[in-house]
Amino acid sequence: MAATPAATLPMRASVGGKARSWLRCASMTPSGPPPVVTRPSVLPRNVLTGYALGSLVTGAFGTVPGLLLLPYLTDTLGVTAGVAGLLVLLPKAWDVLVNPLAGRISDRRGSRSRFLLVAGLVLGLLFAAIFAAPFAGDAASGAYVAVAFLLAATAYAFFQVPYVAMPAELTDGYAERTRLMTWRVAVLALAILISGAVAPLIVETTGGGRSGHRWSGLFVGALIVVGTVATYLGTRRADSRIAHEAEPSLSAQLRVASGNAPFRALLLCWIVQAAGIGTMLAGVQYFADHVIRQETGGTFLFAAFVGPALLVMPLWSRIGKRHGKLRSLIGGSLLFAVGALLLLGSPALPPVAVYLIVAVVGVGYAGQQVFAMAMLPDCIAHDTARTGRRQAGVFTGLWTAGETLGLALGPGIYALVLQIFGYVSSATGEAAEQSSTARLGVLLGFTILPALLVGVAVLLLRGYRESLGPQERREA
C-alpha cells in the first residue's frame, strides 16, 4: 500500500494547534504560510534624530553649571569657595528626591513626549535666570543663584527622567538600543562642545563679569529650548512598547528597582563616575587660569575634550559589538583615568601636549557614556519582560537622581579642595592671583581626584557581571 503523504493524514482533534502547526511545517509538502519570525524593531531615522537632539538639553544643563557656576560664584560674585560649593551642591542634591517622583508621575501620564516638552521649555527660561544676577552684593547674589538653580534643577528632573526612560519603550532590540545610544551620545558630545566651549567664549567676548554671564545664560537657555522642541517633534508619533500594568505604589517600584542586582551595580558605578567627571568639569576654568595660564584655555580644553569624542563614536560602536558593553565600559573608564593622571605633568608641558592628553580623556569619556546608557535600557527591559509592568520611569528616576547627585558632588568636592588649599575669591570678574599652594590644589583636584573616582567606579561593576546569567554575560 502506498504511503499517504504527511500533509494529507487526518489529524485528531485532541492534537493542539501548536502541534498541528509544527507538523505542517515538518512535512515534505508545506501547507499554509511559513512561520513568522519576529525581529527586533528598527527605529526610523527621524526618531533616532529627534531623540538624540534631546541631548542638547541634557548636555547643556549637565555641562554649563558644572563648568561656569562655581567660578562665577567665586570670581564674579565674590562668594567664598566653601560656600559656593554648597550653593552648587544643594540644589542638585534636591533632585535626588525629585527624580524618583518625576519618574512615578511620568509613568502615569501616557505620552512622555508631551511631558518633557513642558519641562524643557520651563527649563530654558529658568537657566537664563540663573545668570541674570539682579542683586548687588555677594550674599544676595549667592542666595538668588541658589534659588534659581534649585528651580531649574527641578524642571530638569521632569525633562530628564521621561527622556532617559524612552529608549526602553521605543525599541525592544538589544543592539538597536546601542545604536540609539550611539546617536544620542554623539549629539551629547556635540552639545557639550557647543555649550561648554561657546558659553565661556561668550562670557569673555561680551565683557566678562555679570554682563558676560547674562549673555551666556541666554545662549544656553535658547539651546535648551531648541533641543526640547526637536525632541518633541521627532518622537511624538513614534511607536512605544509600553507595558500595560504599573506597580501600585512608588515604594513597591523602588523595592523592585533595588532588587535588580545588575541595575544596582550599574547605578553605583554611574554615580561615582559622575562625581569624577563633575570634579573635572568644575576645575576646567581654574585649570586654564592657574595651571596652563591661557585666557581662552577653557574653550580650548573643551574643544580638545569633546572634539575627538565626536570622531570615535563609530569606533566605540564597533568595539562594543566585538567585546560587549560591559568590557567596553571598563575600557573607556580606564582610558579616562589614565589620561587624567597624565595631566599631573601639565605645569611642565606645552599647552598643545596638555590638549592632546585631554583629548585622550575625552575619548574615554565617550566610551563611558555610550555603554553605561546602553546597559541601562537592558536592565529596564529585563524587568518589564519579567513583570509585565511599566516602571521604566522609576528606574530612570533613580538613574538620573544618581547622575545628578554625582555631578553635584563633583563641584562640591572641587570647591572643598580649593578651600583647603587656600583659594582666594574675587568680586571683580577676574580671577585673583593665587599662591603656589592654591595652584597645587587646582591641579590635584583636576587630575588625581577624577582618576581615583573613576577607577573606584570600575570595581563596582563586578556586581553587574556576577548577577547576569550565562547568555546575558556573553551579550554584555
Image: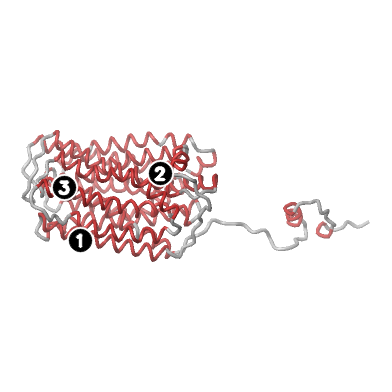
Type of the residue with mark 3: Ala
For the rendered model, the colour scheme is: secondary structure
Left or right: residue 458 compared with residue 238: left
Q: Distance between the residues labelled 3 and 1?
A: 20 Å
Q: Toward which corner of the image does residue 402 lie, by quadrant?
A: top left
Q: Toward which corner of the image does residue 123 lie, by quadrant?
A: bottom left
Q: How far apart are marks 2 and 3 (CA)?
A: 43 Å
Q: In which quarter of the image is the N terminus?
A: bottom right
Residue 342 horizontal/vertical position (percent): 23, 39
Look at discs 2 and 3 and give the one toward the viewer: 3
For marks 3 and 1, the one nearer the N-term is 3
In the picture as drawn, the residue positioned furthest to the front comes out as 248
For marks 2 and 3, the one nearer the N-term is 3
Residue that label 1 marks: 218
Q: What element carries label 1?
A: helix
Picture disc at residue 328: 2
Quick check: marks 2 and 3 in contact, CB under 8 Å? no
